[in-house]
Structure formats: structure tokens, C-alpha cells
Amino acid sequence: MFSYYFKLGLNSLKRNPILTTLMVLTLAVGVAASISTLTILTAMMSDPIPEKSRNLLVPLIDNGPVLGYEAGKPQEQSHLPYRDAVAFLNSKQGVRRTAVYTVTGAIEPTQPNLPVTSVAGSATTADFFAMFNVPFLFGGTWRVEDDANAANVVVISKTISEKLFGKDNPVGKRIKLFGGEYQIAGVANTWQPSPRFVNVFNNQSGAYVGEEDVFIPFANAIANKKNHDGSTWCMGDKMGPGFQGMLDSECTWIQFWFEVENAAGRTAVLDYLRGFTAEQRKLGRYLRANKDQVFDVMEWMSHRGVVSNDRKLSVWLAFGFLLLCLVNTIGLLLAKFSTRGSEVGVRRALGASRGQIFTQFFVETAVLGLAGGLLGLMLTFGGLWLLSQQSLQIAAVARIDWLMFFATFALAVGASLVAGIWPTWRACTVSPAVELKSQ
Amino acid sequence: MLKMKNLSKVYRTHMIETHALRGFEIDVKQGEFVTVTGPSGSGKTSFLNIAGLLEEFSGGEYFLDGVDVSGLNDAGRSKLRNEKLGFIFQGFNLIPDLNLFDNVDVPLRYRGLNAAERKTRIEQALGQVGLASRAKHYPAELSGGQQQRVAIARALAGQPKVLLADEPTGNLDSQMARSVMELLEEINAKGTTILMVTHDPELAVRTQRNVHIIDGQVSDLVRKPPSLLASQASHGAGVAHAAHAINA
């Protein structure tokens, strides 16, 4: 019987086309608004490294000054000072650990026909690539000894590699970078986690666009006095002169990650942090009462406010709008079904039970929902395009995936069925005798 | 085939109680062609609605083909209606956006028959009313008489035990009315029980039996031997007069 009801539903779309168009449009607009905003929110809130996001941990300790501190107030800084980053690198905590800070500069190509290329990248350690599953096109990471020796080695992105060397394998070749000569250890294949969780605010373009052009050893960047190109948090700190002054200060600018194998590993890291800050307190540091914390990837994204409250509010508003559309659809369905009394009467007389009439009209509203979903999908693409004009960040995530594709239809059909319950119930409870008599 | 004993139907509002039927008794045998007459408001429609299981009754008993309908729920009544009854309405009541084939198909769908059997029955029924070639046409493309023939085909397709006809010729001119009546007589001759409400005394005298309802009760039961039918039809006398003559 379902195929029969479905066919009747398709036929009913043709009946009273103005009313049908209004209903489909109402549903489609509501669904498109909801799915557009939801698509962006879910993309922004998605787990960038689901296979190990619970095992990658950011340590957070509050090294701010006691002066002006209010107990219970959340700490402002999210990074580490250099000295603590070095201590953590040497801690042997977790299975891997890495420090990251942003470096920028230029590559001077050896070929005369190529211009100088500005690059932005990360100063980090060899563990970085394995920790964050960075794929390689050629070669691989530098050796652990290169970290220890602050060697002039570099991993370049696929984009930079193609710009400088075309499709050739450049591993082993040398490039002029940041004023020095670096040997290429590897070429990272396209690696664009969304959001860019490793150092979420390390790039002017934000948390969702762009990729690292180059990676150099952390120790090398420090040895070459490469300044951090990004936010640095200094508060009440007496900083000495020059780069060494920065290294010796309490200014926070280095993002740190531990990789552990399980929950016990997380506990061990937290215990280590507590022990570390307890030791440092004896030296007059870490005098604030804020607790030491560790965050996994998703906790860290939430803590850093990668998705703004405005963005979440916009989704609620869109669903509120969908609710209004549903109320409107209920009214339109009531109007449509109210003209069907004689048909209900005839069908009842010919043997349809109340349940069969209910099913017929319910399937009819589902068909309406499918039509609304189809139009809603087209409007969603339009809506996403409009939203993507707002910023590069939104443009980077304003893409519909299969889940959202089916969610559009599910929402449209679900919404139409919810809207259809009352009108359908009214239609199936009419008295056939009265309806037949009124003809 | 259709038996009502001491049946009553009361419509209640908060202000008033209306007794549409009271102490209503009727026993229609298989194969009978019965007309139901009576003035407006006498209870004819209530009787037909109850007989067609479209309305519930307030008291008494009703047996349809031996089934006591009083204990049935909506699904049970719908199933019984679908299997035992066929309806023909004064306004034809075809579904306008279905073609003739699909209109006749409606009761068969609810019967749960397979596609092949439905097709056979639909073609047979449309053939029986002379409209097999118009199966893909829509009701609006037909005359009133043709639409009523489709309605009859729709009723016949279900192979009902009882055909309930409510003023089936009321919206037709005399020629078409005669043609529809002849079709009903033909169907009855093949064994289908027919119960027909009519205001037309000419039609009433053509049937084997006329039930006259006044104030919700059967006031007259006129049984006529088939031999009298033809002569009474030709006289065209009113039901009351005809009944009086036979009773006298």
C-alpha cells in the first residue's frame, strides 16, 4: 500500500498548485536556513583528528603574577614560556611531546626566474609529524639528532615544493630560508586539519584556513633567534633585553602538546604538571591558585572558543525560524486537507479504515517534505554561498557533506510529518456520512 | 442478508434529542431489490448510513450477511464494508484527479488484491457498464450518466453482496435514469442484493419490494410478485397509491 500512497502523494502535489508551492517553499526556506547554519557549526566543531584526539593533550599552567590576581578568575594565557616548554620537552612524559611556535620569513629561490616567496610555518620537533599524522609526499621528518643539534633542516609543504621544484622530489636539496641554508628532509603532503587545532591562533587567516609552508626544528629556530610571529602574553613581567630576554621571561608564546596512550597516561601527565608547579613554587613561580590542567583536542577547541557563541546562537535562531515555518505549514496543510472531505468520505465508504486514511495523508505530507527537502537543498547551497562571502574562515567550512545532504531531507520530511500530524488527524476523523451527504 | 431488529438511532446535542430511527425492523433477503422511500427527514439517510456501516446505531441489532456488526471496531467495520457492500451515490462521488481505472481500483486497493487480479476486475467492471474504452479518461470528461456508470462499476468491482444506492438517478435526466435503472436491474438479476433509496415513485414500483419510512419507522412493507412489476411500472403511479392498491 505504501507505493499506492506515495503515488497518491505525488498526484496531490499537482492538486492546488499554489497552495502546494507555498508549502514546499515554506518548508524549504526553513530547512535551508537551519541546515546552512548547522553545516557551518558542525564543520567548525568537528574533530580534526578523531583517531587520537583524546590522546593529544595540551598542558595549561598559570604562571601569571600574584599582583592583581583574583581567585577563581580563569587564567588568560594559553601558551607556555620558553623555559617550561624546554622542561616539558625533556620530561619524557607521554609517548611523544612537542613544542610549537610560529615563524615567518622568506625563501630565496636559487632559480633566477622565481621571485622571493614569503612563508609562514612552525618551529617544532621531530615528534610533531607522527603526533599529528602529517602525511609525507617525499622523504620524512628530520632525525632526533637534528633537534638536539639545532640542524638546518626543513620539511616543506607540497605547495612550496611544487613552486620551487615542480613535480620533482626535492629531498636532500638545499634552500635559502630565513637567511640561512636549509636541507630538505621531507615534503609534507596536503595537511589541512579543520580546525587547525595544533596552534589555533598561529595564523592571521584564523583557525580554519591555510597550511604551514615550512617546518624547522624548534632548537634551530631558537638558536637562530627566530621570533615568534603571533600572540605573546606578557603580564607584570620584567623582561630582559633582546631575544635572550624573551627566552628568560615569563611571557607565554609556545604551544605544547603531549601524546599519551590512554587515560592513565593523561593522569600521569597531570600528576607530572602538579609536581612540576610544586617544584617551581619553591623557586617563587606559579603562585596563583589556579589548578594545573590538561585538555584533549576537543576540550582545547572548546576552551579556546574556536566556535563563537554567536555562531551557536545563529543555529538556534535558524531552528526557531524553522519552527515558525512549521506553524505556517500546519495552517496551509489544514487548508489543503479541508477541501478533501468528500474524498475521505468516498474512500471510507469504499472500505478505507481511519488508520488507512491517516497513513495516506501522512505519506502525502512526507512527499511534500521530500519536495521541500529538494528545494531546501538548492537553497542551502545558495545560503552557504552567501555565508561564505562573510569571511575566509566560513568559506573554508561552508561545504555540504553526505551527512548534511541526507540530514536536509530527513529534516524536511521530519518537519513536514510533525506539521502534518494535526491536519492529518483532522482529515481522518471526519464523519464519512456527513461528508457524503454534503456532496 | 441484511437484518435489523428493533434498531434505533438517536442524535444528541446538549439541547435536544432527535430520534432518527426507532424500533426499526427490516429483513432483506439475498437477491432482493428493495426501494426505500419516505418523506424528507423520515430517516431514510440514517437507515442507509447505518446499513452501510458509515454510522453507528444507538440500540438494537444489525446483522450483515450473518455478522453482528455491533461489536466491530473501525477497522472491522471498514473491512466488512469493503468486502460486503457497494455504494452508489446521487452525486456519483468519483475522485476527480483519478482516471476511471484508478477510481474503480480504490475499493480493490483496500481489499489487498494483487495487481493482476485488480486489473482483471477493473476491466470486467468497466466492460459491464460499457466504458472499458474510457479507462484512462477522467470523470470530468464524462457525462453524468457515464459517471454514474463508473460509480456502479466501482461498486461492482468489489463483487459486493449488497449494493446500497442513494438516489442513483437523482442527478440524471429521464433517459439516463432509465438506462442506469436497467443496469441495476441487470445486476440484481445476477444475484446482487440491492437497497435503493429514491424519491421517484416510478422507480419504486419497478422493484420487488418497497419499504416506506415515516418518522424513523417502517410504515409500509409492500411485497409484489414479479408478475405485477411490469404493469405497475407502466402505470407510473405513486408509491403510496401503488402500495394502497396492492394492499386493498
Image (cartoon, rainbow, N blue to C red):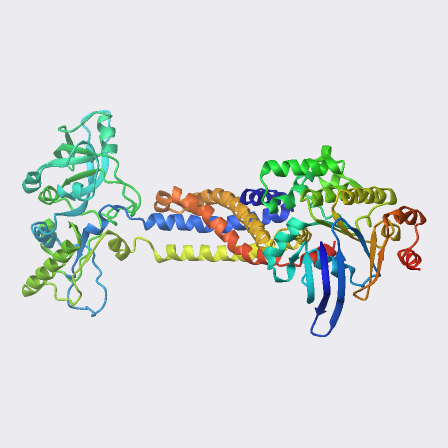
Q: As drawn, is B240 to the left or to the right of A29?
A: right
Q: Quadrant of residue B108?
A: top right
Q: Is residue A304 visible?
A: yes
The one nearer the camera, B14 or A150, is B14
Q: Residue furthest bottom?
A: B15
Residue at 78 percent of width and 62 percent of height: B43
Q: Is residue A386 left or right of residue B139?
A: left
When the figure is inspected, residue B136 is found, relative to residue B231, above or below; the finding is: above
In the image, A147: left or right of A27?
left
Point 45% across, 54% down: residue: A318
User: In which quarter of the view is residue A76 placed?
Assistant: bottom left
Camera-nearest residue between A385 and B181: B181
Question: Where residue A398 sits in the image (x, y, percent)?
Answer: 39, 44
Residue at 15% x, 29% y: name it.
Answer: A171
Query: Which of B51/A195 is in front?
Result: B51
Q: Position of residue A68 (x, y in %)?
A: 19, 68
Circle count: 0
Q: Quadrant of residue A1?
A: top right
Question: Which one is in front, B67 or A187?
Answer: B67
Q: Position of residue A427 (x, y in %)?
A: 62, 56
Residue A331 visible in the displayed image: no
Q: Picture coordinates of residue A123 (x, y %)?
A: 16, 43
